[in-house]
Image (cartoon, helix red, strand yellow):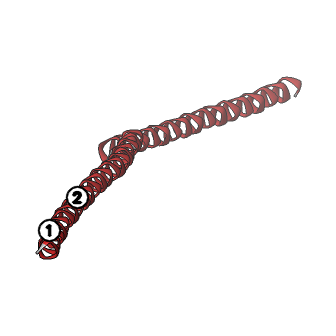
Amino acid sequence: AERDAAERDTAALRERIGEQKREVDAAHAAAAQRVAEKKRALADVRNTIRQRKFEARFKHFDSYAALRDEQRAALEPTDEEVSLEHARLVAEQQRAKAEEVAMERELRHKEDRLRAMRERLAERERNEALIAADASA
C-alpha cells in the first residue's frame, strides 16, 4: 500500500513537473515570439529611418538640381532678350550703313567740287596764257 501511495505521489509529481515544464516551455515560446516581434519592429524602424534618410538625400539632390537649373535659366537670355538684342544689332547695322552711304555721298560731293575747282584753275591758266600771248604779240 505504501508502494502504491509512493508510486501515485511520484506519478503526481511527474505530472506536476510535466505541467510546469509545459508552462515554462509555453512561457519561453511566448517570450521568444515577443523578442522576434520586437526585433521585427526594430528592423522596421531602422528601415524606415534608412528610407527617410535616403529620400531626404535625394530630395536634397532634387532641390539642388532644381536650384541649379533655375540659376542656369536665370543666366541664359530669354527669347525676349534675344529678340531685343537682335533688333538692337539690326538697328546698329542699318545706322552704320546709313552713315557709310552719307560719307560716300559727301566724298562724291567733295570730289565733284575739287574737279570743278581744277577745271576753273585750268581755264584760268589757259586764259592767262592767252592774255600773256596776246600781250607779247
The quarter in which the N terminus is drawn is bottom left
Secondary structure beneath dot 1 equals helix
Q: Nearer the viewer, residue 59 or 107?
A: 59
**Compared to 119, does 60 lie above or below?**
below
Pointer 2 local density, CA inside 10 Å: few below 14, some 14–19, many at least 20: few
Instruction: Please identify, in this view, whether the residue under mark 2 or under mark 1 is nearer the observer.
Output: 1
Q: Secondary structure at mark 2?
A: helix
Where's residue 133, x and y in %? 85, 29
Provide the residue designation for mark 2: 37
Q: Say which label, 2 or 1, has the lower sequence index.
A: 1
Pointer 2 with pointer 1, Cβ within 8 A: no
On the image, which quarter does residue 33 sit in?
A: bottom left
Spatial distance from mark 2 to mark 1, Cα to Cα? 41 Å
Q: Residue 117: image x %, image y %?
A: 66, 30
At horizontal 33% and vertical 44% (from top left) the residue drawn is: 63
- Who's the residue at 70% across and 33% down the image? 118
Residue named by callout 1: 9
Residue 5 drawn above or below residue 64: below
Residue 116 % position (x, y): 63, 34
Three-letter residue code for mark 1: Asp
In this view, the residue in front, 78 or 134, is 78
| The one of 89 and 106 positioned closer to us in this rendering | 89
- Residue closest to the far right: 136
Question: Disc 2 residue type?
Answer: Glu
